Every structure is written in C-alpha cells, then in structure tokens.
Image (cartoon, grey):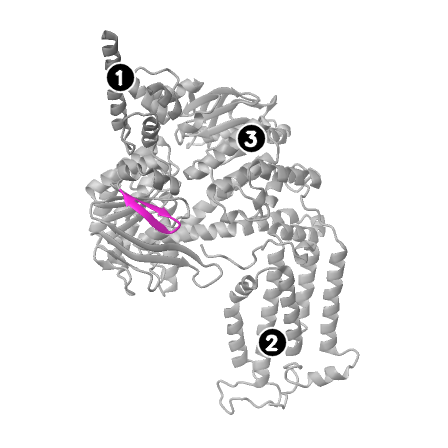
Amino acid sequence: MSIIIKNLSYTYNPKSIFEKVALKNINLQIENGDFFGIIGHTGSGKSTLINHLNALTRIQKGSGEIIIQGIDLTQKKLDFRRLRSEVGMVFQYPEYQLFDETVAKDVGFGARNLKLDKKEIEWRVKEAIELVGLNYEEIKDRSPFEISGGQKRRAAIAGVLAMRPKILILDEPTAGLDPRGKKEILDLVQNIKEKMCRTIVMISHNMDEIARVANKIAVMHKGEIVCVKPPKELFSEREILKKYNISMPQATLLANELADKGFEIDRGIVDEEELIEKITNYSGQIANDEEINLNL
Amino acid sequence: MKAVSFGQYYPSDSILHRLDARMKLLLVVLYITMIFFVQSYIVFFAILIFAFALVLISKVPFLKVLRSVRMIMFLMIFMFIITTLFRGGNVGEVALTGDLRFPSIYLSGIIHASHMALRIFCLVLGTSLLTFTTTPVELTDAIERAFSPLKLIRFPVHEMALIMSIALRLIPTLMEETGKIINAQKARGAEFESRNIFKKAKAMLPVLIPLFVSSFRRAEDLANAMDSRCYRGSEGRTRLKQMRYRLKDLIALLVVVAIFFAVLVFRYNFFDFEFITYLGETWWGGSSDLPPPSII
Amino acid sequence: MIEFKNVSYYYNAGTPEQVRATKKLSFTIGEGEFVALVGHNGSGKSTVARLMNGLLIPQRGEVIVDGNLTSDNKKIFDIRKTVGVVFQNPDNQMIASIIEDDIAFGPENLGLPPEEIRKRVDWALESVGMSEHKRGTPFRLSGGQKQRIAIAGILAIKPRVLVLDESTAMLDPVGREEVLKTVMELKEKEGMSIVLITHFMEEAIKADRIIALDKGEKVLEGGREILSMSNELDRIGLDAPFAARVAGKLREKGVSLADNIYEIEELVRNIM
C-alpha cells in the first residue's frame, strides 16, 4: 500500500467567521503501481488534498491520518527530506517556478536540497532532463527563461524528477497546452510511470485525458470523496455523473447517445478506438442483414 | 489564501459609505490630528465610543474591523513595553520598582505608554474605517483631486493615483501567487525557516525571481488590457462616480470639527472649566506630563 | 470591418534576435461574422490579436479597420473603439478592485458623461449575466466569471468586433462553457463580429469561417469542412473535433456516412 488516508478532514481558519471546511472525512487507499486520477469541480478540495500528501499542508490535530510508504505524516518531527524523496509534486503551470541561471541548475535545485553529493546530483539532473524528452547537452546551459513554453514545462517536471520520487503527484499537467502539447505531456507522464515513479496521482479537468491514463478515478465533491472506480465503471454510472455534474469523455458520450437510440453498446466505453470498432462491426452487420433481406 | 483584512473595502450602503470620499479623507486627517491632542484616558474612552459607534453605523462586521487592528497589536504591545521600560519618570517622581537601576518603571511611564498604545489603536480604527467604507478607486480619486493643485507644478497626480489603485488591486493576486510559488519550491525541498538572515535571504531567491518574472508578465498584460480599453492618460477622461458635496458631508464635517473642538477644550481648558481642572489632576483624566498623581 | 493585407510582423525587429511572428498574412473579417482563428501555441495567433487593434503595428503590409490604418496614430482610438480584445489571463486584465469601477474604465477613457457610463456599465454586466456582482470584488470569483467580467469591460466600449485571444485557454470546462455561451449570446443579440482565437477545435464548430495558422502563415481557410481534414490539422499540431475525427475513421473502415459531420448528434443520426 503506497498511500493510506484515514478520516482526513481539513478546515481553513478554524473557529473564526472565515471558517471553511475544505476536506470532510476522506478515506482513500492508493496502491503501488496505481495511476490514480482525481476529478471534481474547482473548489471541491482536490488541491487541499494533494497538498497534504507532500506535507505542504499539515494534518490538523485529531483530523485523521496519512501514511505514505510507511511514513506517518501526523508525527510532529517529520523527516521532510525523506518524505520529499518519496513523493514528488508537480503543480499547475509548473514553469512559473523556474528561477535559476541555467536549466541544469534549476533542475538540480531539488536534488541539491536533498544534500546529495555532487556526482549524484549531476547524474540525476542528466537522467531527469533526458527522461522528460529534452536534449541534455543542448539545453543544460541555457537560461530557463529563454526556452519555449513546452520546454519550460518539461524542465519544471524534470526538476521534480531529479529528486527521484517513487510517487508523483501532478495537478493538471496539461493545463493551457495546445492539443499536441497535451498529448505529448500525457505520453510523458505515462513514460515516467514506466521508468521512474511507479505510482502516479493526477488531477485533471479533462475527462478524455483522465479516462485514457488512469486505472482508478476518485470523484471529489464539496470536500468529500464520493466514489472511487475504474474509468469504465465510473463513466457508465449515469446517476453519479448527473448528481455531481461530471461530464463524460467524448467517446462515452457518443456511446450513450447511440445506446439511447437502441444501439447495443456498453455505455462505459471510454476508448475511441474500441468504440470505432464496435460501430464498424455493427454497421457491417446491418449491411449484411440488409443484403440477406434483399436476397430473400 | 489568507484574507488580508487591512484596508479592504466592505460593500454596504451605510451613510459612511455614501459620504463623499474627499470629505472622508479630510475627516480622517482631522481625526488623526485630533488624536495627537488627546492626553487623557477619559477622552480616549470617549473617542473609542465615538469610533465604535461609527463602526456600528458603517455596518462593517465588528470582527472584520478588529482583525485589521489585530495586525498591529504586536506593534502596540512592543511600543508599550519599550516606552514603559525606557521613558523614565517625571521630575521628582519615585519609581514603582524602588531603587533598582533596571528596570526602573514609573507610574507616569505606564500612563504615557498606554496613551501611546491607545493612540495607535484609535488611529488604525479610524483609517481602517475609511478603507472599509471607501472603494480604492474612490480613495485614489479623492487623493487625486485633493492633490490636483500640484498639477500646476507638473506633478503627475493622475499617474500616481492610478499607480496606487493598480497596486491595491494587485496585492491579493500577488499574495496568492507568492503562496503558490513558496509551495512549489518547498515541494522541491527548499527551506525557508533558516535563522541565519543571509541564508534566509538566499533561500528567498527561488521565490523572488519567479515572482519578479511573473510580475513583469502581468505588467505587460495589464498595459495591453488598458490600451485595448482606450486608455490615454488623464486628458479628456470622465468618471462614473461624480464627486459632489452634499448636506450630509457638511453635517459630518461639523460633527468632527465639534469633537475636535471639545478635545482641544479638554486639553487646554480655554474657558477655565472647573471640572476640567479637576480632571486634569487625576490619573484617569490628566496627562502623564503633569507631576505624578498621588492617588495610588 | 477588418482587413489584413500581406501582414508580416517581427519581434525584436532589426536585432539579431529577430523572430518572425506572422508572414504575409491576408484575410478579412466581415460585419457580424463569426471567425475562428486556430493554430497551435506559438503559431502567431496571439500576435494577430494584437495587430487587430493596433497594439502592434506590422513592419510589412497593412491592417485596416473600418477604413483606417492601424499605423495611423490619429485613428488609433477609433480603431480600439471598434475592435475590443479580451486576453487570456483573467487575472491580468482587471484594473480596479471593484467590478463596476473596472467596467467603467473603458467608457471613462472615452470621456463619456457619467449617466452614459452608468448605463453602459449596467448594460455590459447584464449582457454577461454578472449584474448581481457589480459592487463586489473579482478575487472570489471563478475563472469563468472573471473572464466574463473582462468581456464586460470590453463591451462597455461598445466595439463592433469582439476578439477573444485564447480567452478560454486557462479555464476549466465549466468556465469555458460559460464564456462561450456568453459570446454566442452577444453575437445573436448585438450582431457583433466575433473573432475567436483558440486551439480547441470544438470551439470552432459554430464559426462561419475558420482560418488556420502555422508558423505565422495562413495554411487553411474555409467553412466547417476544414474540421474534417484530420490529416492537415494533425500536421499543424491540431486535432479535428471528436465527432469529425471518429466519422473520418469510420469512413476509412468502409462505413458509409454523410459528408458533413462535426457534432456528436450529427454522427449519431448518421449511424442509426
């Protein structure tokens, strides 16, 4: 078990007129090897939840517990260095956190903070830059402010990877990118999962995206986790989708429209290719039937 | 995001909100001047009652006002302690601490220090009442108009006022952004809790540089947005909200002037009122500059 | 309304870092027309937005708005009164911290009498459905709401062309829908011309005309049929809308479908 969250609650400005409950009794288990998706509308508590996983937000006293790779996050004297080499965090628009003179130095910032030796840092920086698909020799001495937007985002992700986390948390890693950029970053995340971080937790507003990559999806609503299901099951639960105003992936939407019209098809289909195949077969069948009818 | 209470407009339709902003500015200047003439507990008490009455009239929630005062509570306590410790006593006054060289605390010192703390309290109460009931735009407009004679000597009054209002508008945005960047760098293992001031300054670079970069980007965006909305300086510009003095402004002025006059009477006793002479000799009605009252 | 004639724009012109953002770009935007300008990030589409209202002046070629050249300094305010641009980041377009004061900024610059400013502020907020927030501050609002305020700020100038420069790119799906709905209503009710600059091809479905840019050049121009050109779009880093894409793949597999399929409903009707 990679991440265990038990009865976690969180309140902003407790006991004041500005009191606002952000998380309500969250129970969640994320296993090693999961690609775990979190969806929910803006303000549903997603950010507060993931900030807890990196101890950027500390658990309030008596408001539940979190255990990550055996580290108990409720303890007062938490070993942050150890935690942060277990859990890496990529925020929204991560390119806005670049600051150092060169890309290599910037990527190495996290690794330097782990107080590793020089050789190790250098090696990790190279590894991370190459893992995100940038050319190390070409980019290492350039200023992070003069490379392209897409490169900036990759460099920023590399900065987290250089800490070699086993769990990677990403908050909308494709926000603001164009279709190709989105696809590339999504492929990158899957590649990272294969090569470095076995467990991925990703927030997304894009249902097509999350349905494509996640093996489990948690739905958050007003500070609560209302359900955790594999994408196919989740997107075939029409009542849940309706109740929490979650849109469907486009493929699911089409499948449902077809099903409504009497087409025999699984309502939970999330994959475009699978859907195309089903429709092709069906049309072929109709064509056959018509032929048979004609022959008769 | 932490709410910044100091100087934030609270929308409502009270009479204080509807007073002309220029008049409010003048009244606050009068009020501040008046506070410096106050030298006795009983007058402070009267002024506090007056100020709290205004808070009630303004319909701004009490807690909000207190929050803005809380921010300078530290300053008040600090000044109180320092003044009490170091002011010394009046001629011929015996220290409460006896013959000790340090600390040597005098009753008149305590009175003086508490007057100072009360003065700051009244000051903040009055000025935050101004900013609670006046929109930043009204306020900068008022300042612009109040200083408009300076245009004759080519002082860029309009530009200064605009800069002020934009600065006010950007504070919450920048605060939020700072929080985000700090979190992102913390996730990369940055430590900001160092005691060494040089180390601390260096640790802030990963926050300050991205903040700078993004501020420049914001500045450019804002300039584009202003240009797109036909901005061309103060020339030929009109205002949505015209400023006009009305009867209520005059009445408000009369009220404040009357109170100011009363304060002066208490201080200098122009008319030789006997009760003022009497009050002046007590510890609660008199000033700390007078010979030490012998009551206690 | 707007005419681009062989427009080339270079950033850092005349320096070693000179970068060409648009190349010999020519097109027109007609009265009341809804044009989608699509392209990947860095294709030069935001430069086009800034060229439209004279924030940038082309080094080669000319941009003409309502018969006026954007390079004519005397006409620049007429041009900005005609072409209103809403930008990407909703947080960076707000000048005042009270919503109605912010909306008033444009008309105040135009030197209108206070009663007229009041009318326009109320009308603009009504048009974007944000009237109840007029005395509030923008900070507590959602991204979509903030962007509607930014639109209202431009509306108050009463432009005849509304340019949205990737105004939905930073919003979540709910916010994006809000903004698009508002824009469509404005087109219907006020008969404004709309230039929607975007890389979300689904947003282009409702457009009268689509212009696709790549490396600052116009590579495609035409009606909705452009949305079915999966291969061409893919080459310039864009995706065909879902229904058009699926229809294309189905046709490849030999399923017979009608030609013009861009929306899911159309596709469903065709399959059944």
In the rendered structure, find residue C186 and report the number of the disc placed on it: 3
The kind of residue on which mark 3 rests is Leu
The kind of residue on which mark 1 rests is Ile
Q: Is residue A62 above or below residue C255?
A: below
Q: Is-magenta flag for residue A226?
A: yes
Q: Position of residue B180 (x, y in %)?
A: 40, 51
Q: Which residue is mark 1?
A: A286
Whether marks 2 and 3 lie on the same chain: no
Q: Name the one closer to the observer, A261 or C144.
A: A261
For the C terminus of chain C, the quadrant is top left
In the rendered structure, find residue B115 and report the number of the disc placed on it: 2
Under circle 2, the secondary element is helix
Q: Residue furthest front?
A: A296
Instruction: State how far apart marks 1 and 2 are (Cα).
Output: 94 Å
Which region of the structure is painted magenta? A217-229
Horizontal side, residue A9 vs residue C206: left or right:
left
Please state which of the two labelled residues, at mark 1 or mark 3, is closer to the viewer: 1
| Figure quadrant of residue B283 | bottom right
Q: Residues within 10 Å of mark 1 (few under 14, many from 20)?
A: few
In the rendered structure, find residue A125 and report the number of the disc placed on it: none
Q: Chain of mark 2?
A: B
Whether marks 1 and 3 lie on the same chain: no
Magenta stretch secondary structure, dominant: strand
Q: Chain of mark 1?
A: A
Whether marks 1 and 2 lie on the same chain: no
Under circle 1, the secondary element is helix
Q: Chain of mark 3?
A: C
